[in-house]
């Protein structure tokens, strides 16, 4: 039986893929799903089909929250006088 990714449709995620001997993280949007593949939008413009058998893990993409926390922290940090 094939895995299902319907819970991830329309969400920004990071996919962990196995490509030969390599593990590859891909950041993007899950667009659609078929029996054997996931339609995935990279960088907001390119859509690719990824075979489900290549997908090892799916995680919610928290990159924007990470950037916001770092920006807030840098605004609170005291500046050193030169």
Image (spheres, rainbow, N blue to C red):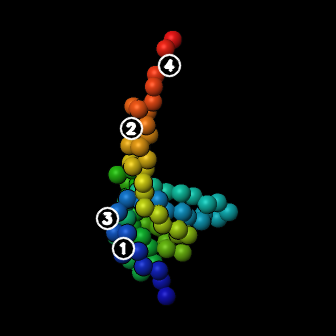
- How far apart are the alpha carbons under marks 1 and 3? 9 Å
The quarter of the picture where residue 49 lies is bottom left
Quick check: marks 1 and 2 in contact, CB under 8 Å? Answer: no
Residue drawn at x 42%, y 79% as measured from the top left: 4
Quick check: marks 1 and 3 in contact, CB under 8 Å? Answer: no
- How far apart are the alpha carbons under marks 4 and 2? 17 Å
Q: Given this view, does label 1 or label 2 mark the residue nearer the observer? A: 2
Q: Residues within 10 Å of mark 2 (few under 14, many from 20)?
A: few
Question: Which element type, helix, strand or loop, lies under badge 1?
Answer: helix
Q: Position of residue 25 (x, y in %)?
A: 53, 57
Q: Given this view, does label 4 or label 3 mark the residue nearer the observer? A: 4
Query: Which of pointers 1 and 2 lies earlier in the amino acid sequence?
Result: 1
Question: Which element type, helix, strand or loop, lies under badge 3?
Answer: loop
Query: Which residue is tagged 1?
Result: 7
Residue drawn at x 43%, y 61% as measured from the top left: 60
Query: Which residue is tagged 2?
Result: 72
Query: Which residue is tagged 3?
Result: 10
Residue 47 seen in render: no
- How far apart are the alpha carbons under marks 4 and 3? 44 Å
The quarter of the picture where residue 53 lies is bottom right
Q: Position of residue 7 (x, y in %)?
A: 36, 73
Quick check: marks 4 and 3 in contact, CB under 8 Å? Answer: no
* Residue 80: mark in rendering: 4
| Most foreground residue, 37 or 55 | 55
- How far apart are the alpha carbons under marks 2 and 3? 28 Å
- How far apart are the alpha carbons under marks 1 and 4? 47 Å
- Tell me if residue 59 comes above or below residue 35 in the rendering: above
- How far apart are the alpha carbons under marks 1 and 2? 31 Å
Q: Residues within 10 Å of mark 4 (few under 14, many from 20)?
A: few
């Amino acid at each position: 039986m094939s895995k299902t990714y319907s819970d991830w449709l329309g969400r920004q995620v990071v996919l962990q893929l196995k490509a030969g001997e390599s593990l590859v993280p891909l950041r993007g949007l899950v667009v659609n799903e078929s029996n054997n593949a996931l339609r995935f939008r990279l960088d907001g413009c390119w859509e690719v089909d990824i075979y489900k058998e290549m997908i090892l893990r799916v995680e919610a993409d928290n990159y924007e929250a990470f950037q916001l926390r770092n920006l807030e922290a840098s605004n609170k940090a005291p500046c050193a006088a030169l």
